[in-house]
Image: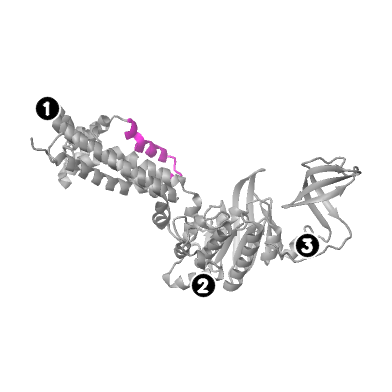
Amino acid sequence: MGLDFQPLVLSFKLACVTTIILLLIGIPLAYWLSFSQRRYKYILETLVSMPLVLPPTVLGFYLLILLGPRSFLGGILESWFDVRMVFSFAGLVVGSVIFSLPFMVNPIKAGFQSLPVYLTEAALTLGKSRQETLLKVLLPNIKPSLWTGIVMSFAHTLGEFGVVLMIGGNIPGQTRVASIAIYSEVEALNYSAANFYSLILVAVSFSILLTFYLLNKRTLKVF
Amino acid sequence: MIRIHLKKQILTSDGPLLLDVHFEFAGGTFVSLFGESGSGKTTILRMIAGLTEPLEGFIQVEDEIWLDSFKKINLPPHKRKVGFVFQDYSLFPHMTVWENLEFALSSPRDRGMIEELLDIMHLQELEQRKPESLSGGQRQRVALARAVLRRPKIFLLDEPLAALDTSSRLKLQDEILKIYERFGTTILLVSHDLSEVFKLSRQVFVLERGKISKSGKPAEIFAHDHISGKFKFVGQVLEIFKEGVVNILTIQIGNNLTKVVATDEEIRDIKVGDKIIVAAKAFNPLILKYEGS
């Protein structure tokens, strides 16, 4: 039996792309949630955390409805940009970003909220704009939170199953990530292949988390 | 000229208070805003810096208008050239002393000023240290140097010495004066410490019940009510000890402990923990130079 590495490669690619996008969205979103005085931020805060409690299938189901070629949004994407969201890698990325959002946003938000106000105020009175204060003062002081967000989002995306299955299906090379491959190998009673994928996922997730905790212990000491 | 008019509702320990202050002073003056803690002094400084928004107000610093609520002018904090020194240490923990100072520069051409300030403030040795390894006095010196590097139109000092011990306090008072004389800047100091206000400032505004109640030179303001030729201190009784026919009271006055002899008659109503006045009449105090640190 030839071992197929494609699902593993796809899983890592998905996790990398998702984490990068999440970092770009997560930092401004967490910043806004931490410092905004607006009432409706609580609604957004709730929405961000919804994937923590919802079954992944619910999210996958609505994404399928929302992004399907016959839906309004899916129709526009397909006819204007020639992008098909369902049963494609692009769709997987959208699903994973939404599904892992709380794993990126919540640690960064907690990081921002733990910082003393004087850091921001001192930087502002020294003539720095809000953006410069964020980049040069706030972010460097919440490095452990940023790492937590990155590692958790990455690891969580690796282990994703429900959303991926709903929106991506099981197309080899496109949407057949490792977790899906395990499922279909087991269905085909092909236990050795399932075991191969599973072992690698276990080993990789374990190493990522272990490295993270070891590093974090050191960074936290510096503070 | 610096003109300030600010109105703001604040919460004090005695309930809500309407802060409504008008004051103005000439540029280049060392001015103090004196008042009890909780009287709204810090709020006034924060409003000048743009960190707190007033109900309404007007702030003019030299030829710039920073705030005019009628004309809807309200510069954000980073557009107001202030040198704010906070009461608590406000250094950036992830930067060294040098990096903290460099952060305040608006143009890299001013880098030579860092060297000069490190020299004036005796900070050269600490250049590469992180704030966490500095003492309270050293941190406030760095914070002060950092504020200078901003090249502010006005320094706002929010009780910058309140958290320091006496010797660092005296030393830093001298540093502040040195900066004032060297750079000829406008300084607005907030303090509830009479000796500090007296020593440092040329002009005092007294804040009472949300209004500026008095203003003038420190000697004029404090001459009548606070400074007197008599020795009179308020202290707290820590111990009453009977020895023979007299009683010996241990009293805490400020940070000093002192023992005083008293008759039974005098201490009839006094018990441990009471606040008392210790006064002396008609004697010549000895004045000696203080050599300790």
Image quadrant where residue B180 sits? bottom right
- Secondary element at tag 2: helix
What residue is at 40 percent from the left and 53 percent from the top?
A140
What residue is at 51 percent from the left and 59 percent from the top?
B71
- Secondary element at tag 1: loop
Quick check: B119 above or below B23? below
Foreground residue among B162 and B155: B162
Q: CA distance from mark 2 to mark 1?
A: 77 Å
Q: CA distance from mark 1 to mark 3?
A: 97 Å
Foreground residue among B22 and B189: B189
Q: Which residue is mark 2?
A: B116
Q: Subunit of mark 2? A: B
Q: Position of residue A214 (x, y in %)?
A: 36, 44
Tell me the magenta residue range: A34-53
The label on residue B85 is none
Q: Which residue is mark 3?
A: B223
The tag earlier along the polypeptide, 3 or 2, is: 2
| Discs 3 and 2 share one subunit | yes
Q: Amino acid at mark 2?
A: Glu
Q: Quadrant of the N terminus of chain A?
A: top left
Q: Subunit of mark 3? A: B
- Is B65 situated left or right of A138 in this image? right
The label on residue A188 is 1
Q: CA distance from mark 3 to mark 2?
A: 39 Å
Foreground residue among A165 and B20: A165
Q: Position of residue B140 (x, y in %)?
A: 56, 60
**Which class describes the residues within 10 Å of circle 1: few (<14), some (14-19), or many (20+)?**
few
**Which class describes the residues within 10 Å of circle 2: few (<14), some (14-19), or many (20+)?**
few
| Discs 1 and 3 share one subunit | no
> Which secondary structure dominates the residues rendered in magenta?
helix
- Is B280 situated left or right of B205 in this image? right
